[in-house]
Image (cartoon, rainbow, N blue to C red):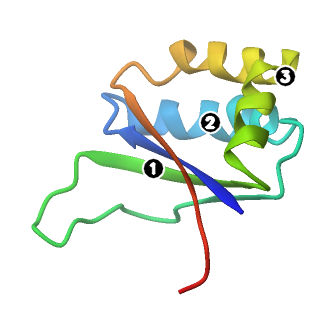
Amino acid sequence: MAQLVALYKNPSDPQAFDDYYASTHAPLAKTLPGLRRYEISAGPVVAASGESPYHLVALLQFDSLEAIQAAFDSPEGQKTAGDLANFAQAGVDLLMFDSKEA
């Protein structure tokens, strides 16, 4: 398995961010070819050291890193990636990695 973790930084208008994410971006992301599982954080994102710079975390699971790349190379992936500029003005960090049970 492979994971894509999207760490969305704290927006200036959290309600507008949440509304757009739920109504537009999440439905787009769910069309990514090869997507096996899609989860988002519920409630505040907290850090062990105190205040978190993140508002929302999305976890997307695929079969492999190659499957993640293929998903983002697809028309659906291009549309999903292009949509980030419409609501994630504060920034988003995208991390991708293979995963295994420990």
Q: Quadrant of the N terminus?
A: bottom right
Would you identify the image quadrant in which residue 23 lies?
top right
Amino acid found under the numbered disc labelled 3: Glu
Residue sitting at 41 percent across and 32 percent down? Answer: 92
User: What amino acid does circle 1 point to?
Assistant: Leu
Direction bottom: furthest residue = 102
Q: Earlier in the sequence, mark 1 or mark 2?
A: 2
Disc sitting over residue 76 in the figure: 3
Q: Dot 2: within a 10 Å radius of its alpha carbon, few (fewer than 14), some, or many (20 or more) residues?
A: many
Residue at 33%, 25% (x, y): give it. 90
Label 3 SS: helix
Provide the residue designation for mark 2: 21
Residue 76's spot in the image, x, y percent? Answer: 84, 22
Q: x%, y% of residue 57?
A: 48, 52
Mark 3 or mark 2: name the one nearer the start of the chain.
Answer: 2
Measure how far apart labels 3 and 1 are at the Cα level: 22 Å
Question: Mark 3: few, some, or many residues within 10 Å (few <14, many ≥20)?
Answer: some
Q: Which mark is residue 56?
A: 1
Side of 9 where 87 appears, left or right: right
Question: What residue is rendered at 36% in x and 26% in y?
Answer: 91
